[in-house]
Amino acid sequence: MHKLQERSLLREKADGRKATGRYHIETWGCQMNVHDSEKLSGALERDGYVRADGREDADVILLNTCSIREKAAEKMFSELGRFVPYKRRNPELVIGVCGCVAQQEGERIFRRSDVVDFVVGPRATATVTRTLERIRNGDVQARGTVDTEYRNDSIRFPYDEIRREGVGTGKAFVTVIEGCNHRCTYCVVPNTRGREICRPMTSILGEVGSLASQGVMEMEFLGQTVNAYRDEDGNTLADLLPAAAEIEGVRRLRFTTSHPAQMTDRLMDAMASASPTVCPYLHLPVQAGSSEVLKRMRRGYDREGYLRKIEGLRRRMPDMLFGTDVIVGFPGESEEQFEETLSLLNEVAYDTVYSFAYSERPATKALELDGGMPQAEKHERLRRLQEQQKTLQERRNRQWVGRDVEVLVEGRSKRNPERWTGRTPENRVVNFDGEAFPGQLKNVKLLDSSAFCLIG
C-alpha cells in the first residue's frame, strides 16, 4: 500500500471520518514564514486534510512566499510555471499563494500566472481554510479571491490549538508580535506585514506551557521586531522572558529578530536574570557599519550606539555570541563606507552573518535616493564581505574543537543522513555520529570544524 494511503487510512480510522484531501506547502523566507506554514498546516489538519508525500500527490498546494528581496519574489513566479503540468493532469487541484508576495502583489499575481486559484496575505492567513472549502465545493466566485486584510472576528490570529511540526523535535516557534512600526527606507515588511500587533502575554505563556508539557524544551519567540513587544497590559519582552523561563520543562529560550533601537537596558537585565534559560546567542541586525549609511537607511541608531548595545550585552552575559544581517551596495555607499562595514565585522566578531546585495523593493523610500551602483559592483562587495566573514568563522569555530557541548537534536543531517544534526545553546550547528533521536539533549565531543558547523 502507498505510504500516503496508509497514513490517510490510519487517520480516518482514528477520527472516524474520511480525509478532506491531501495538502502540500512550500515555504520561502524567514522564521516567521516557517511558523506561518506550521499554522497553515495545523489549520488544514484540523479541517481533515493530511499531508501529501509531495506536490504530485496533493489536492491543495500552498506557496508561502517571501518578498524581502526581489529575487525571492521572482523565484515564486518561476516556480508557478512548473505547476502547469500538475494543473493539466488534475483540474481539481487548488493552488494558493500565501505570504508576503501575496500581500504585496495581490490580484496582479493572476495576471502573471493562470494556475493560481486564490491569494491570501499574512494578515489574513486564518481565512485560508474557508476559501479552500468554498473553492472545493464549487463556489465559482471563490476562485480569484484576494484576501490581504485582518478580520475583526475570532480568527484574527490563528494561534490556538495549532499543530506545530516542531513538536517532536524539541523546539517550537511562538509568535509574540506581528508587523513592524519602523520605516527603514529599504524595507517592504511594513507594507506586507502591517503595523505592530502584540499578543497578550497570558496567551503566549499558555502556549509555552502547552508545548513544554508535550516535551518541547526550546521556544523561540518570533516577531519582525520582537523586542518591541508590549501587550495591552504593558508587559514587554523583559517581563515575558523571565515568566517563560519559570515554566516547568522549558530549557531554552530564544527570540528573533531584534531591532537595536529596542534593545533596552531593562531587556538586557532581564536576559541576564533569566540566564542560562535565555540562550547566549542573539541575532541583532546592524545592516551597515557606517553611520552615514545607517542614517540613509533610517535605522534609528549609529555605529557607536550599536556598539554600546553589544558592549552592554557582553558585560551582562560574557558568553553571549552574535549574529547579524548586512546589506551592501546601498544607494550612495562609498568604498570607505563599505570598508567601515568590514571593520565592524572584525570589531564585533560575529558568529553568523546573513549578507545581501541591496535589492530595490516597491513602495520604499530608498527608491528616491541617489547613488545607485551597478549590480557587478554590489556583488563584488558582497563577495569580499562573505570571504572575510568565512575566514573569521573558520577561525572562531576552530576554538570549539575539543570541547564537550550540549546539543538539542533536530534530526538527520541533510548532507550526510548517517549523521545527526542539532544546535548548542549558542546556536552553533553540530553534526555528529552516534545514537540519537529528534528532541533529545545530547552531550557531544567536538572533533573538527568548518566555517559553518562543528563536527562531533
Image (cartoon, rainbow, N blue to C red):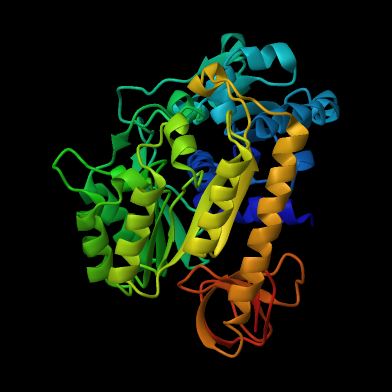
> Residue 255: percent from the left, percent from the top?
39, 55
> Residue 207: percent from the left, percent from the top?
32, 54
Quadrant of the image for the C terminus? bottom right
- Which of these two is toward me, 329 or 408? 329
- Which of these two is toward me, 98 or 197? 197
| Left or right position of 120 against 237 | right
Q: Residue at x 29, y 62 (%)?
A: 312
Q: Which residue in the rendered view is the most extreme toward the top?
A: 141
Res. 452 in view: no
| Left or right position of 269 against 129 | left
Question: Does residue 159 lie above or below 451 as drawn?
Answer: above
Res. 392 in view: yes
Q: Residue at x 78, y 35 (%)?
A: 376
Quadrant of the image for the N terminus? bottom right
> Residue 7: percent from the left, percent from the top?
66, 55
- The count of marks equals 0
- Which of these two is toward me, 188 or 176? 188
Q: Residue at x 67, y 60 (%)?
A: 388
Q: Which residue in the rendered view is the most extreme toward the left?
A: 233
Question: Does residue 210 lie above or below 371 as drawn?
Answer: below
| Left or right position of 86 against 141 | right
Q: Residue at x 51, y 27 (%)?
A: 188
> Residue 270: percent from the left, percent from the top?
22, 62
- Which of these two is toward me, 272 or 405? 272
Question: Does residue 245 lie above or below 367 as drawn?
Answer: below
| Left or right position of 154 against 85 | left
Write down the quadrant of residue 124 in the picture.
top left
